Image (cartoon, rainbow, N blue to C red):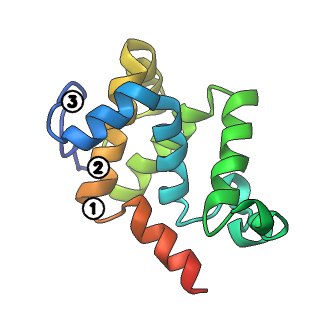
Amino acid sequence: MSGNWSTGLFAIFDDLSIFIYGLGASRCLAINNSVVLGEGKASFGLDSAKIAGPFQCAGFIGTDGAFCVNCAVCTCLPCVYILWRGDVRKKFGIQGSFMGDLFAALCCACCAIMQDSRELKIHGLAYGEVQAKTMDK
């Protein structure tokens, strides 16, 4: 791998909407990133539509099931974010290691989560697009 991150760890002002989301709800942004990275599937490859199906009466649609599952996973295993960050690196061929991901998370988890989100957005992966894809199925 020879790629680098498109934006720096502390380039938090590069995207104002991600900055506001990350500052106000960084955990939700990390979960959102994991759903986008999984193309609408929850952690462990669980199908979002099957999870959300029984809860449609409560307004669940598309990737809502995946978001809820990943929220539960993140609550029970907070360190799972480091693995999700590694998945972002692998998907886009970004140089790095588990220890680097751990250091970024320990140094400033909020900044690392925003960096992941900017990377996903730069590569054309956004929550609205994943939501639309899963709704078309």
Does the rendering let one see residue 93? Answer: no
| Residue placed under numbered mark 3 in the picture | 12
Identify the residue at horizontal 55%, vertical 34% (top origin).
81
Does the rendering let one see residue 14? Answer: yes
| Residue 88 image offset from top left, x and y in percent | 42, 49
Q: Earlier in the sequence, mark 3 or mark 2?
A: 3
Report how far apart the C-alphas of labels 2 and 1 lie in the structure: 6 Å
| Residue 45 image offset from top left, x and y in percent | 70, 62
Crowding at mark 3 (Cα within 10 Å: few <14, some 14-19, many 20+): many
| Residue 85 image offset from top left, x and y in percent | 46, 40
Callout 3 amino acid = Ile
| Residue placed under numbered mark 1 in the picture | 123
Residue contact at pointers 2 and 1, CB within 8 angstroms: yes
Callout 1 amino acid = His
Quarter-of-image position of residue 15:
top left
Report how far apart the C-alphas of labels 3 and 1 lie in the structure: 17 Å
Name the mark on residue 19: none
Is 110 left or right of 95, judged from the image as shown?
Answer: right
| Residue placed under numbered mark 2 in the picture | 119
Crowding at mark 1 (Cα within 10 Å: few <14, some 14-19, many 20+): few
Residue nearer the viewer, 6 or 25: 25
State which mark lies toward you, 3 or 2: 3
Q: Secondary structure at mark 1?
A: loop
Q: Secondary structure at mark 3?
A: loop
Crowding at mark 2 (Cα within 10 Å: few <14, some 14-19, many 20+): some
Callout 2 amino acid = Glu
